[in-house]
Image (tube, rainbow, N blue to C red):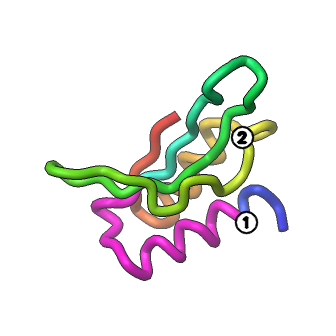
């Protein structure tokens, strides 16, 4: 399964429980130089935010355009 397929699968799983208005794809930097950036799926609202799926895949080789394209497919937000 490719990284893009993993992200789509994670988004679909998140949307089973949460509204698209509250779901974002997040690309997070590693906590130090040793750790790679990674993709997670987050819930957000005016009052709360938390990871729905904390680690989907590492972000190596992905572009902001890849993430934006998937977010647009599902009408959700994204942050790089």
x and y percent of residue 2 in the render?
82, 61
Extreme-right residue of the structure: 1
x and y percent of residue 47 in the render?
15, 50
Q: Is residue 18 magenta?
A: yes
| Disc marking residue 59 | 2
Is 31 on the left-hand or right-hand side of 13? Answer: right
What residue lies at 30% left-to-right and 50% top-to-bottom? 49
Q: Please, is residue 78 above or below residue 7 in the view?
A: above
Inter-mark Cα distance, 1 to 2:
13 Å
Query: Badge 1 local density, few (<14 within 10 Å), some, or many (20+)?
Result: few
Q: Is residue 16 magenta?
A: yes
Q: Please, is residue 60 above or below residue 54 in the view?
A: above
Give the main secondary structure of the magenta stretch: helix
Query: Badge 2 local density, few (<14 within 10 Å), some, or many (20+)?
Result: some
Nearest the eye: 31 or 63: 31
What residue lies at 63% left-to-right and 72% top-to-bottom? 9
Q: Which residue has dot 1 on it? A: 5
Magenta region, residue range: 5-23
As helix, strand or loop, the secondary structure at mark 2 comes to: loop
What residue lies at 35% left-to-right and 66% top-to-bottom? 20
Can you tell which quarter of the image residue 60 is in?
top right
Nearest the eye: 65 or 79: 79
x and y percent of residue 59 in the render?
71, 40
Extreme-bottom residue of the structure: 16
Specify the quadrant that holds the N terminus.
Answer: bottom right
What residue lies at 64% left-to-right and 29% top-to-bottom? 30
x and y percent of residue 33 in the render?
73, 18
Is 16 on the left-hand or right-hand side of 4? Answer: left
């Amino acid at each position: 399964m490719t990284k893009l397929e993993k992200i789509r699968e994670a988004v679909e799983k998140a949307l089973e429980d949460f509204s698209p208005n509250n779901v974002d794809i997040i690309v997070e930097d590693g906590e130090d130089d040793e750790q790679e950036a990674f993709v997670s799926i987050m819930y957000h609202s005016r009052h709360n935010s938390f990871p729905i799926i904390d680690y989907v895949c590492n972000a190596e080789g992905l572009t902001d355009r890849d993430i934006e394209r998937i977010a647009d497919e599902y009408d959700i937000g994204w942050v790089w």
